[in-house]
Amino acid sequence: MGYTVAEKILLAHSDVDHVEPGQVVMIRCDVVLANDVTGPVAFRQMEKMGTDEVFDRSKIVMVADHFAPAKDERSAILIKRLKEWSLEHDVVFYDQGRGGIEHNLIIQEGWVVPGSLIIGGDSHTCTHGAIGAFSSGVGSTDIAHCLVFGEFWEAVPGTIQVTVKGEKSPFVTGKDVILAVIGQIGAGGGTDNVLEFVGPGVQSLSIDERMAVSNLAVESGSETGIFPADEKTAAFLDGRTDKSWKAVHSDSDASYSRTLEVDFDRLEPLVAKPHNPENVVPVSEIVGTPIHQVVVGNCSNGTMTDLRQAAQMVKGKRVHERTRMVVVPATQKIYREALAEGLIDILVEAGAAISTPTCGPCFGGHTGALAPGENSLATTNRNFKGRAGSPEASVYLGNAFVAGATAVAGEIVNPAEVAP
Amino acid sequence: MTVNGKAVVVPGTNIDTDVLYPGIYLNIDDPELMKPYLFDGLDPSLRDQLMGDTVLVTGENFGMGSSREHVPLAMKAWGVRCVIGSSFARIFYRNCVNLALPAITCPAAAEAAEPGSQISVDVAAGKVSVDGREFVATPVPPFMLEMFERGGLIPWAQHKLARA
């Protein structure tokens, strides 16, 4: 019997000659990633292991993004620790102003290629499935083990195959594909599995949109969400990386734990209601909900594609007087591109506040927290109770068209209804 | 291995790690200093029940969301010896395995337990006793059992380094 793309990548990074779901195997990593929150905890665990030696300095990347720029003294100490550790071990460190949000950043910088194995001390490490990699988010003790040995234990997951078909309507994006999946299977429906995205509809998703899809795989409980590499992946990687790679696809007789379908012909922009990403409804069902803050950004939707979509909806208009708009380009490079393209000017003219790349507003760390009674419409990935500030605030998740249109209206609107 | 403790029940399904340990306190890397913030976004009064050896009782998909190991680190620092639940999210479960905090899937025991119940768990045999009532848990795979028994990933790594 054949293998799925996930099984093939795991097999190629192991010392076994067969894998099947449930089996526990040791898996080698091509990139080990951590940030200012998970890195310092991992360094403590590494000290307890009794070693200061890393397995391969060329495969380790540290990024200051969660509390950067440091919101207080404690955060500054963690970022300092991350930087000093990186210098001591001679590994790549992206500081504020030089990088951005870790996942978008390392894809942008060519660290990720199809068939590779990315392990990260951050649950949204699943984002790298967009490039056809197997990527997995883990905790800090796992990261410590990976820093020392370059491998981690893995219970081989099953695969849920998602076939995307039909023709995408205007204002429908990759975000809606993954919200549709989470709505179908629920927040725990993908546990012990990965998602694999195939079908004719995948062609209409750009790499930026695929990143949004893969990024939210974890919100269904799935370990990751993989797009087997195609021409779009190859074009994206051209000139971006010097790593050699080969596309990995599932065998035709591979075995799946479940198959799902997302049909663009029947898909309108979706919104996940508070306080769980599985509470998915068509945007038309909740138009009129007053919104006090709109956030465009984070590792799911802070790309050039998202900034263009948001800017298109606010161009020449003003953000509603009830509403604050915060825009967070995911990386320094995206920030500059958005400046050069005039997007930042459009957004600022409309009344948006632009933030330097950071995870802050998404996880309630800093920059854009919510007061009791406030509603937020965010392009981020989690709307858990209290995550973005007050437990008495509510977060709705949607795509960047919905976010831009909602900022102008001051209430949730269907972008298709308000577009010029 | 057998663990014993008094039940502290964390009600609800899909309890995420954000409510278990809010993001604003992620700028702490010392487990002892994480203790005051466990359960802070869910019900801070749950901390008042954490006295001595504790078995946490949880619902479906417990620990979903963020990978923050602060959650099981703070639990261990409080004296939580075992978590018994209907089902666990992947990263939370991994973190428990790596820290040798047995996470046992046993919906019937989780249903039967009340705050203060005396719980005893034979991890290898997959037996859970709640106030004297016996339940059969989902078997723990051999690798995870070895991790629970050997003290988790740190001693496991020390052993590997000693052999190298």
Image: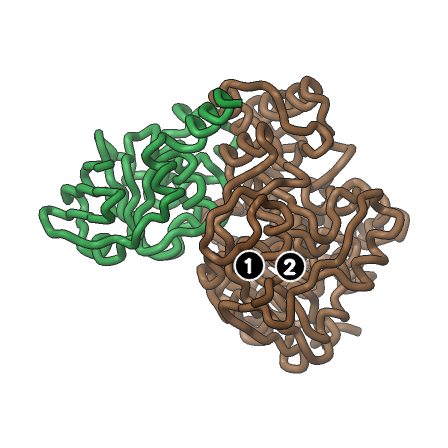
Mark 1 highlights which residue? Answer: A194
Using the image as rendered, state which of residue A104 and residue B130 is in the foreground.
B130
Mark 2 highlights which residue? Answer: A226
Which chain gets the green colouring? B
Q: Describe the element under mark 2 as helix, strand or loop.
A: strand
Residue beneath the point at 76% across and 70% down: A203
Quarter of the rendering containing residue A28: top right
Image quadrant for the N terminus of chain A? Answer: bottom right
Which chain gets the brown colouring? A
Of the numbered discs in the image, which one, if any, rests on residue A144?
none
Residue beneath the point at 50% across and 56% down: A394
Please state the chain letter of the residue tagged with numbered disc 2 in the rendered image. A
Name the spot of residue A337 as percent of width and height, x first.
86, 48
- Check if mark 1 and mark 2 are on a common chain: yes
Name the spot of residue A235 as percent of width and height, x first.
85, 58
Instruction: Residue type at mark 2: give it.
Output: Ile
Residue beneath the point at 77% across and 55% down: A246
